[in-house]
């Protein structure tokens, strides 16, 4: 909320730094979550982290990361229970990714009447949304905490999967699909 006299109609009203700090908490929490997913992808690929990062850095959101992670887990013959855990996790994180994108990428301004920060949402997934939405620091911080909770949930799944793989290192695994080039 702004204190002081009302600005003139054409005067720019800056967003308070505290609001930007709360947005930064959202971005940071999300980066931590995606990094955990990246690390498990690198583990499944059995590659050096820097080499794996050349691939995962091209994945723009959590969607392609999870779309890569789940078949990798299946190729490693991770138990059905853990594959189901990944599926449930993805079912929860997918909608959060859409919210995160709106929170990070939408335009903000100060509503002249209420003197509150609003996020101007512009989206068109089967229906146009073109409207200001009030946004508070507590709502941003709450979302960041929700993302941290999802990260902790992912870490638990990740630990169970890695423990399973470690305990079954000698397990015979089916050959992985491959293409070979015909020789002359």
Image (cartoon, rainbow, N blue to C red):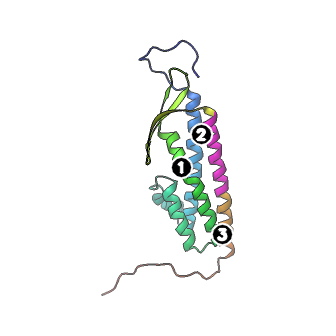
Magenta span main SS:
helix
Which residue is found at the position 67% from the left and 63% from the top? 159
Q: Is residue 157 left or right of residue 120?
A: right
- Extreme-left residue of the structure: 184
> Label 2: how many residues lie within 10 Å, few (<14), some (14-19) or many (20+)?
some
Mark 3: which secondary structure?
helix
- Residue 183 versus residue 150: which sits nearer the camera? 150
Magenta stretch: give its range: 138-154
Where is the N terminus found, in terms of image quarters? Answer: top right
Where is the C terminus found, in terms of image quarters? Answer: bottom left
Report the residue marked by disc 1: 97
Residue 35, position as x, y percentages in the image = 56, 53
Up/down of 108 relative to 183, above or below: above
Residue 144: in magenta span: yes
Residue 32, position as x, y percentages in the image = 59, 49
Q: Marks 3 and 2, how far apart in space?
A: 33 Å
Which residue is found at the position 60% from the left and 32% from the top? 136
Q: Marks 1 and 2, how far apart in space?
A: 15 Å
Whether residues under marks 1 and 2 lie with C-beta atoms below 8 angstroms apart, the answer is no
- Residue 7 versus residue 58: which sits nearer the camera? 7
> Label 1: how many residues lie within 10 Å, few (<14), some (14-19) or many (20+)?
some
Report the residue marked by disc 2: 25
Quadrant of the rendered image containing residue 24: top right
Up/down of 98 relative to 36, above or below: above
Quadrant of the rendered image containing residue 69: bottom right
For residue 154, say whether it is visible: yes
Which residue is found at the position 61% from the left and 68% from the top? 83
Report the residue marked by disc 3: 81
Which residue is found at the position 58% from the left and 41% from the top? 26
Residue 134, position as x, y percentages in the image = 55, 31
Observer-side mark, 3 or 2, equals 3
């Amino acid at each position: 909320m702004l204190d002081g006299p009302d600005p003139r109609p054409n005067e720019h009203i800056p967003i308070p730094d505290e609001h930007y700090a709360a947005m930064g908490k959202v971005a940071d929490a999300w980066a931590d979550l995606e990094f955990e997913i990246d690390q498990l992808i690198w583990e499944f690929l059995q590659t050096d982290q820097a080499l794996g990062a050349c691939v995962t850095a091209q994945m723009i959101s959590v969607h392609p990361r999870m779309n890569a992670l789940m078949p990798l887990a299946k190729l490693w013959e991770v138990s059905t229970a853990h594959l189901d855990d990944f599926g449930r996790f993805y079912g929860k994180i997918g909608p959060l990714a859409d919210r995160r994108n709106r929170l990070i990428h939408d335009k903000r301004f100060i509503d002249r009447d209420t003197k509150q920060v609003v996020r101007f949402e512009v989206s068109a997934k089967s229906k146009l949304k073109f409207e200001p939405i009030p946004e508070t620091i507590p709502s941003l911080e709450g979302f960041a905490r929700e993302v941290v909770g999802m990260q902790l949930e992912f870490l638990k799944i990740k630990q169970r999967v890695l423990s399973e793989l470690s305990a079954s290192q000698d397990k015979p695994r089916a050959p992985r699909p491959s293409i070979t080039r015909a020789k002359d």
